[in-house]
Image (cartoon, grey):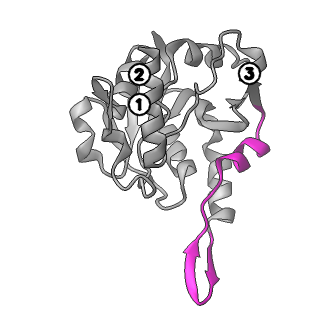
Amino acid sequence: MYNDITGIILAGGKSTRMGQDKSFLKFGYHTVIEHDAELMKSIFHDVIIITNEPDKYKILGFKCYEDIFKGIGPLGGIHSGLTNSENELNFVISCDIPFITKEVIEFIISQQENYDAVITKADGYIQQLCGLYRRKLIQQILQLVQTDSEVETRNNIQHKRKCKVLSLIEMVNARIIDFETEYENYKPGTFFNINKPDDYDLAIKMLNDIQ
């Protein structure tokens, strides 16, 4: 149990491609968010949820906070999480990657050294929504918000650009773990992400194969 690291669950996505709130999809005996909540509270003494619908998540018993900067994507959730955390070290996880294990999280934490952020690369993607972030990154995020989220106009319609988490990773002292080669017990699908109905169907099949 880590007392000096805050666990931050990002549950602020709109689930547009899923067509329903993916946090509350059934996953085994629990919902996806219940699974994440049980995992995080088994690792961290302090756990918070970032969501723009806090009333839906209060049943889990954690403090819930809304995005301070809304409409700019996951970076806004990370910013709110770091701002509302009481610890310098924070482990951020998106609510839609249900196959992450305690051992995976602890391995990522073990790589912290003096890095500003520690994330992973696996299955051909940078997995920026499952990693360690220091609270001091708030200032760099604010810089990105001020420059990248300016309103742009296309076809006479205004759009707010989303700030990319990878833009933050590129500007700070970050460690990207190649999980497929550096983690001895790596299993394909560890960072599988549920975004649309087909993903959910595959996740259930993967879960049934494990059990």
Name the residue beneath numbered marker 3: 180
Tell me if residue 9 comes above or below residue 157 in the rendering: above
Q: Residues within 10 Å of mark 3 (few under 14, many from 20)?
A: some
Where does the magenta region start and end?
A: 150-174
Q: In this rendering, would 22 be left or right of 104?
A: left
Task: Let me know if residue 118 appears in the view.
Answer: no
Kindly identify which numbered label has been placed on residue 208.
2
Tag 1 secondary structure: helix
**Which badge, 3 or 2, comes first in the chain's sequence?**
3
Tag 2 secondary structure: helix
Q: Quadrant of residue 29?
A: top left
Name the residue beneath numbered marker 1: 204
- Asked whether the beta carbons under mark 2 and mark 1 sit within 8 Å of each other, the answer is yes
Amino acid on which disc 3 is placed = Glu
Q: How far apart are labels 3 and 1 at the CA level?
A: 23 Å
Q: Quadrant of residue 172?
A: top right
**Which badge, 3 or 1, comes first in the chain's sequence?**
3
Tell me if residue 101 comes above or below residue 63 in the rendering: above
Identify the residue shown where x is 43% and y is 40%. Answer: 200
- Asked whether the beta carbons under mark 3 and mark 1 sit within 8 Å of each other, the answer is no
Amino acid on which disc 2 is placed = Asn
| Residue 63, percent from left and from top | 31, 35
Instruction: Locate the N terminus and report the quarter of the image it occupies.
Output: top left
Q: How far apart are labels 3 and 2 at the CA level?
A: 23 Å
Q: How far apart are labels 2 and 1 at the CA level?
A: 6 Å
Tell me if residue 90 comes above or below residue 58 in the rendering: above
